[in-house]
Structures are given as C-alpha cells and as structure tokens.
C-alpha cells in the first residue's frame, strides 16, 4: 500500500512539473503582431529568425510567419512561392537552402523556426500562416504536417494562432486539434459563417474591414477574435485601435506601440 502511495505522489509531481515547463509563455498584453517578424526597422530579412527575435525583444504579443512545403515535403518558413529563382514546391530543401538569407541565416525550416521561438520567449506568440498549395491534396498535408510538427516539439503553448487564406486548411487544423485557435485571412466570409464553422476569428485586410465596418460589431457580439492586416499607416493603426481590435498585424511594430501610447494618453 505504501509503495502505491509513493508511486502516486511521484506521478503527481511529475505531471505538475511537465505542466509548469509547458506553460512558460504568457502572451504580452498588447495587440501588436509583427508581420513576418519585426524586420523593417533594423533591416532583418522578413521571416528570418533574427526578425522573430526582434519581435520578442520588442515584447510584441505575436510574431507572424509563413509556412510552405518543398518538393521533398520539408516545411519551411518563407513568404513567396519561389525563393532565389527556384519554385519551392518543385525544389528540394537542399537545393533551396544552398542560398542563404541576406543576413547569412540558413533558410529556416519550420522545425528550426519554432524551436528558436521557444527559447528565451515568455511573451510573443507564434502566428503561423500556412500558405495554400497549388498542388491537389497538399493543403490537407500542409495542415497535418504543421500540427504534427508543433506537437512533436511540444510547442502548442507557443502557437497563438494558425492563419490561412485556405478555408480547408484552417478547418482541417480545427478537426485535428480542437484546442487550436484559427483565423481566416481571405476577407470574404461574414462573422456568422465563421462562428458556425467553429473558426476563432477573422484576420482581414484593413480596407475590407473599413468597407464592411458592421462586421466589427457582429464579430464582437459573436465572441470572435478580430485582427487587421497589414496596418502600416498611422490612420489605419489608429482606426483599428479606435475599434478596439484584439490584434493589429503590422510591418511597423514600433510605430504601433507609439500610437497605442498616444491613444492611451488621450483616454487618461
Ligand atoms: Mg503572412
């Protein structure tokens, strides 16, 4: 009996420890999401680990990045469909990675990128955009492999959102990970449709949101998250702040923090 009690206590302590180690990140209490990392002010390459580190240093609540898959099914972090003149979906990772990023970094794999985001980061959520594929069937594979990678790295707590222009991708992510938070990027679906499909919120172009301003209230009433991209001009940032958006996705995180300060001084 005593052995059982000791074993039970050990298991209890072990599970407490693992919970603690997986909950080291609390997303910063601000709406600023650095778009492809905080790359602009210091001249880092977009989607580089250096730009991710800068977003963490700035205390952004999120750092966004783009995921694509190579011909040999390696998930990488890069924006365009081609890289250094090579089409990503028809090139191997080895072929692509011969070309370094302008700051000397190796073209990041998703594994390297997420791993970097789990070190010395207690504030900044990873906002993972999955770029739709042109190849039939690959969108589902992209969703499956991305979620599997996050699970393998035990990075669930670090991924604040999955986002995509592909509705199939975000719906698939919800199917395989009910706890995942997903935002739709395309701007074509009304809040009610997103809510009915179990989508966490909308992440739309600022001008589309201005054009359909009633969606802002509808989304809030439905409890959906609101994010706008890409707000780089003061007037757009101020508009999103005035409408109390949960998130502002921007190439100008420093300016966004300044505008938040101005807005809070106005209301004080
Ligand atoms: Mg993106």
Image: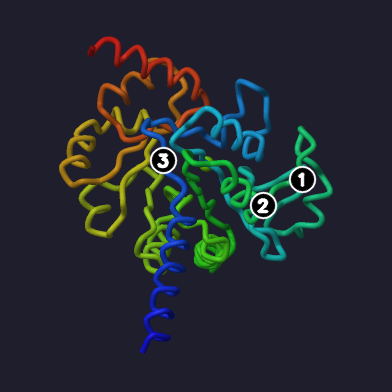
Percent position of residue 164, x then y: 45, 50
- Residue at label 2? 112
Mark 2 and mark 3 in contact? Answer it, CB < 8 Å: no
Q: Is mark 1 within 8 Å of ligand 1?
A: no
Percent position of residue 119, x then y: 60, 46
Q: Earlier in the sequence, mark 2 or mark 3?
A: 3
At mark 3, the secondary structure is loop
Residue ID at (56%, 37%): 36
Percent position of residue 1, x then y: 36, 89
Eyeballing the image, is 168 above or below 25?
below
Q: Horizontally, is 246 left or right of 122 in the view?
A: left
Along the line of sight, which residue is nearer the eye, 82 or 226?
226
Residue ID at (43%, 67%): 13
Between the residue at mark 1 and the residue at mark 2, the CA separation in whole angstroms equals 10 Å
- Residue at label 1? 106
Q: Horizontally, is 210 left or right of 119 in the view?
A: left
At mark 1, the secondary structure is loop
Mark 1 and mark 2 in contact? Answer it, CB < 8 Å: yes
Q: Residue furthest left?
A: 221
- The quarter holding residue 239 reads top left
- Residue at label 3? 27
Eyeballing the image, is 243 above or below 7?
above
Q: Residue furthest front?
A: 2
Along the line of sight, which residue is nearer the eye, 91 or 4?
4
Percent position of residue 58, x then y: 52, 27
Between the residue at mark 2 and the residue at mark 3, the CA separation in whole angstroms equals 21 Å
Image quadrant holding the C terminus, namely: top left
Q: Residues within 10 Å of mark 2 (few under 14, many from 20)?
A: some
């Amino acid at each position: 009996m005593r052995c059982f009690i000791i074993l039970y206590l050990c298991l209890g302590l072990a599970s407490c420890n693992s919970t603690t180690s997986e909950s080291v990140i609390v997303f910063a209490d601000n709406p600023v999401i650095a778009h492809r990392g905080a790359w602009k002010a210091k001249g880092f390459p977009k989607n580089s680990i250096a730009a991710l580190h800068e977003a963490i240093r700035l205390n952004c609540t999120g750092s966004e990045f783009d995921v694509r898959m190579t011909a040999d099914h390696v998930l990488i972090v890069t924006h365009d469909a081609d890289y250094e003149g090579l089409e990503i979906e028809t090139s191997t990772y080895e072929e692509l990675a011969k070309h370094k990023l302008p700051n000397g970094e190796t073209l990041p794999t998703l594994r390297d990128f997420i791993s970097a985001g789990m070190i010395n980061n207690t504030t900044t959520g990873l906002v993972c955009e999955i770029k739709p594929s042109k190849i039939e069937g690959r969108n589902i594979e992209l969703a499956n492999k991305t979620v599997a990678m996050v699970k393998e790295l035990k990075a669930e707590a670090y991924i604040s959102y999955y986002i995509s222009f592909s509705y199939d991708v975000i719906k698939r992510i919800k199917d395989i990970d009910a706890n995942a938070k997903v935002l739709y990027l395309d701007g074509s679906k009304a809040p009610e449709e997103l809510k009915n499909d179990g989508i966490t919120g909308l992440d739309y172009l600022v001008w589309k949101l201005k054009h359909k301003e009633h969606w802002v209230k509808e989304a809030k009433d439905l409890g959906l998250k609101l994010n706008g991209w890409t707000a780089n001009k003061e007037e757009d940032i101020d508009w999103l702040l005035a409408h109390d958006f949960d998130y502002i996705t921007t190439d100008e995180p420093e300016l966004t923090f300044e505008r938040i300060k101005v807005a809070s001084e106005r209301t004080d």
